[in-house]
Structure formats: structure tokens, C-alpha cells
Amino acid sequence: MGNVGAKEVPVLLSPDGRRIDGRKLDELREIRIRAGALHQADGSAFVEWGANKVMAAVYGPREVHPRHLQQNDKAVIQCRYNMAAFSVDERKRPGLDRRSQEISKVIAEAFESVVFAEEYPRTSIDIYIEVLQANAGTRCAGLVAASVALADAGIPMVDLLPAVAVGKIGGAIALDLKKEEDNFGEADLPMALVPQSGRLVLLQMEGHMTEAELAESLDLGVKGCRDIYEKMKQALRERYALRPSDRGAA
Ligand code: ADP
């Protein structure tokens, strides 16, 4: 049978340490963040990160639906992460599959660590993340977009939540995997950081790496998160300092 049906594995790392898109191992893809991209939501943000395009909208604090989820001592944080049918090469079956449910859950739990939910008992803070175009790292792009959207909605938080995936490709640890690196690499490790405290509030791993590689990955990821954090703050500064007229229209 030989190679029948086998996918050709691309060379992920050149001999001089360059990746398939020319990046160095510790280099992020280009990131653009726009706070307040939608006018109907209480807060919103649009993130273009490499070939990812992700919109986040936030509503709340508002009445809880469904009512039985209401909590008397704090706001409930609900998240719906969704990938559009046209967001990937092969048309994705629309709707909430297991992967979307898992990502929605881990993102909601990450925000429970930073939102001052006890200030809004018996309410809901609803986060919608729509992935319009996907190229690996969409849960991280979703976290970044949702953080900026929450801040844009004026929801009090300890801090924003920058996030990035680190992984192992061609035997080396690399920052911010793109699709081919995620598919054909040896490991993928998305994480989200509370920059002020240095605490990680999301950490997942697929694949294999050694303890030393894990330590190196965490270091690289934390540095990446701190760079993304600056871009997130800049997006909020642009929204509120340079474009005050948008605020009125929102
Ligand atoms: P993340 O997007 O957070 O990296 P995964 O590691 O699960 O999450 O997915 C990696 C990438 O694989 C996605 O960003 C997307 O490009 C692609 N992908 C995920 N689910 C599907 C699907 N159902 N159909 C086609 N491509 C998908």
C-alpha cells in the first residue's frame, strides 16, 4: 500500500531555524486588534492574527437566560465559541460540536478568574466568539478578542487575558503555531496569562514534550503573552483616547 492516502508532511523548520512562513522560533504572527468593532453589543473587539479572523461581542451584566443558571452571590459568565462554516478549508459542519463546547467552557472558566463577578449577583455576562477564518490558535485569538470586548463593555476585571499557543515543531519549541505547524508538529500548548500576577488561567496540551521542553514552552509563551498584552492595551487606548466619537455611536 505504501503511501496511499498518506498526507505529505511539510518541512516545518529549515536548517537555519526558519519556519514555513519565514518566522523565527520566538516570533509571533502579525496581530491587529480593534476594540469596539460592533455597535449593537455592550462591548466588542475584532482580532486579525495571522490568517485568523475572530470577532468577540459581550453583553451584560444582564438578566440570566436560562434562569436556572442564576447565582445569588455573583454573575454567571457564559461563553459561546463558534466557528463559521466558511472559516476552514473544508466546509465545517455548522453548529456547536464537542470541540466548540470544550473551548467555550475553558474560556468561560478563564474569565471567571479575572472578572469581578461578585459585584453583579443574579446577572449574566455573555461572551460570544465567532471565528470567521481559522488558522490555528483560535481559542487564544478568542480569549484576546473577548478580553478586549469585556474591557470595552466596562466589565471590571483584575486584568486582561492575553493568550498564545506554543508548540514543538521539527524538534524545537516555537511560539504561536500556524495551521500546518499545529497539524504536523509534535505538540501544541495553548495558554492564557494574568500579566499582573503571572498566573496562568488556561493551559492545555496536545502531543508530547519533555519536562525541560515544557519549561521552555512556558517561558516562551509567557513572553509572547506579555507582547500581546501591550497590543491589547494599545487597542483600548486607541478606542478611548483617539476615537471618542465611536464611543458615542456605540
Ligand atoms: P485552536 O484553533 O485553538 O488551535 P485546535 O487546535 O482544535 O484549536 O484547532 C486547530 C485548527 O484546526 C483550527 O484553528 C482550525 O484551523 C482547524 N480546525 C479545527 N476544527 C476544524 C474542523 N472541524 N474542520 C476543519 N478545520 C478545523
Image (cartoon, rainbow, N blue to C red):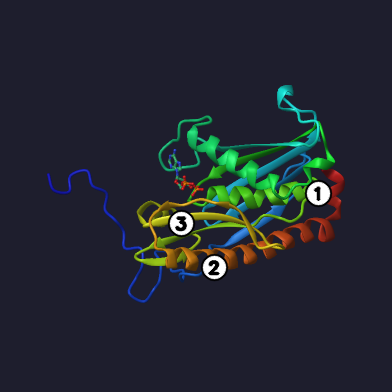
Residue 108 coordinates in the image, percent (x, y): 64, 41
Mark number, residue 20: none
- Residue name at image x 53 percent, y 31 percent: 96
Decide: few, some or many residues near mark 3? Use Cα within 10 Å; few <14, some 14-19, many ≥20: many
Q: Nearer the viewer, mark 1 or mark 3?
A: 1
In the picture, measured across the screen, residue 236 lies left or right of residue 88, that is right
- What distance separates the C-alpha of mark 1 from that of mark 2? 28 Å
Local packing at callout 2 (Cα closer than 10 Å; few below 14, some 14-19, many 20+) is few
> Considering only order in the chain, which callout, 2 or 3, is on the residue closer to the N terminus?
3
Residue 153 picture location, percent across and down: 79, 45
Mark nearest the camera among 1 and 2 is 2
The residue located at (64%, 65%) in the rendering is: 226
Question: Mark 2 highlights which residue?
Answer: 219
Cα distance in 3D space between marks 1 and 3:
32 Å
Q: Does label 1 or label 3 sit earlier along the sequence?
A: 1
Q: Quadrant of residue 118?
A: top right
Residue depicted at x 50% and y 70%: 26
Mark 3 sits on what residue? 178
Q: Secondary structure at mark 2?
A: helix
Q: Position of residue 166 (x, y in %)?
A: 49, 60
Residue type (three-letter) at the residue carrying disc 3: Lys
Instruction: Classify the position of the C terminus by image quarter.
Output: top right
State the quadrant of the N terminus: top left
Q: Quadrant of residue 32?
A: bottom right
Residue at mark 1: 156
Lower sequence index among marks 1 and 2: 1
Vertical relation: 105 (above or below) 237 = above
| Amino acid type indicated by mark 1 | Pro
Any atom of ligand 1 within 8 Å of the CB at mark 1? no
Compare residues 172 and 17 and report the one nearer the observer: 172
